Image (cartoon, rainbow, N blue to C red):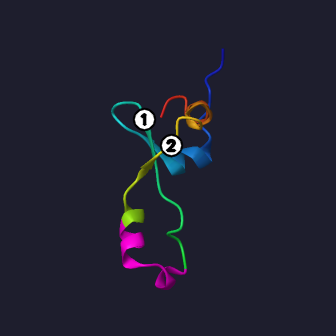
Amino acid sequence: MPKLKTVSGAKKRFKRTGTGKIKRSRVNRRHILTSKAQKTKRRLRAPGLVSEVDLPAVRQMMPYG
């Protein structure tokens, strides 16, 4: 059986935590930041977790990472 390759787009976007959950960065932080409130931008700094619904798909993309 050949080894499974990690999807290169997924390896740039997700990191696995010590407990096996998968971290992701939040959306809406790329451009036009002047029109967003400081509180919103501060909240978007913190990483989010991949939802339970999407976990099987992300885990399949990252079998080893």
Q: Are marks 1 and 2 in contact (CB under 8 Å)?
A: yes
Q: Residue at x 40, y 53 (%)?
A: 47
**Residue at disc 2, secondary structure:** loop
Q: Which mark is residue 3?
A: none
Task: Give yes or no for residue 36 being in the magenta stretch.
Answer: yes
The answer to which quarter of the image holds residue 18 is top left
10 Å neighbourhood of mark 1: few (<14), some, or many (≥20)? some
Residue 41: x and y, percent?
A: 41, 71
Q: Which residues are magenta?
A: 32-42
Q: Residue at x 47, y 55 (%)?
A: 25
Q: Amino acid at mark 2?
A: Val
56 w.r.t. 8: above or below: above
Q: Residue at x 53, y 67 (%)?
A: 28
Residue 11: x and y, percent?
A: 53, 45
Q: Which residue is mark 2?
A: 50
Residue 4: x and y, percent?
A: 62, 27
The residue closer to the viewer here, 34 or 39, is: 39
Residue lying at the far bottom of the rendered structure: 34
55 w.r.t. 47: above or below: above
Q: Which residue is mark 1?
A: 21
